[in-house]
Image (cartoon, rainbow, N blue to C red):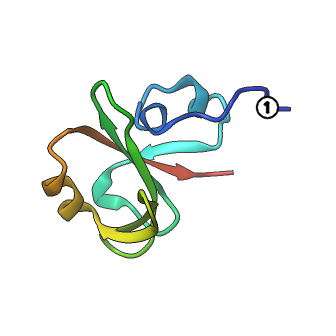
């Protein structure tokens, strides 16, 4: 049984995350090769990150403050200057 607590968005955005890597079920892929179902994570410095699930080419679905919303990745990155890195994980199990 996996005995770790749920992790936050900044941990998902960490490409060296032991929490994610220890599952042996995810691999990092380049953002240019993202596909439907991938987990996309945006890391912020000193703040909670943001994450979602890739839906269609260039888009992702995520929970916002009051709703679940589909957004375009590049548009989100232009609007949020606090993002310092983006990581994309693909489920492989």
Q: Is residue 23 visible?
A: yes
**Residue 15: x %, y % from top left:** 41, 32
Residue under the point 14% across and 44% down: 81
Q: Is residue 40 visible?
A: no
Q: Is residue 8 above or below residue 65?
A: above
**Residue 55: x %, y % from top left:** 44, 72
Q: Please state which of residues 56 and 43 is positioned toward the viewer in this rendering.
A: 43
**Residue 43: x %, y % from top left:** 33, 37
Label 1 secondary element: loop
Residue found farthest to the right: 1
Residue under the point 59% across and 52% down: 91
- Where does label 1 land, which residue? 2
Q: Quadrant of the N terminus?
A: top right
Q: Is residue 20 above or below residue 74?
A: above
Residue found farthest to the bottom: 56
**Residue 88: x %, y % from top left:** 40, 48
Please tell me how crowded label 1 is: few (under 14), some (14-19), or many (20+) other residues with Cα within 10 Å.
Answer: few
Q: Is residue 3 above or below residue 70?
A: above
State which quadrant residue 48 falls in.
top left
Q: Please state which of residues 30 and 71 is positioned toward the viewer in this rendering.
A: 71
């Amino acid at each position: 049984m996996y005995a770790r607590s749920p992790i936050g968005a900044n941990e998902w955005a960490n490409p060296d995350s032991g929490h994610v890597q220890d599952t042996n079920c995810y691999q990092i892929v380049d953002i240019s090769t993202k596909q439907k179902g991938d987990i996309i994570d945006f890391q912020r410095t000193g703040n909670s990150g943001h994450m979602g699930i890739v839906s269609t080419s260039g888009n992702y679905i995520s929970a916002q403050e009051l709703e679940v919303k589909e957004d375009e990745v590049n548009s989100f990155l232009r609007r949020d200057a606090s993002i310092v890195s983006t990581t994309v994980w693909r489920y492989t199990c």
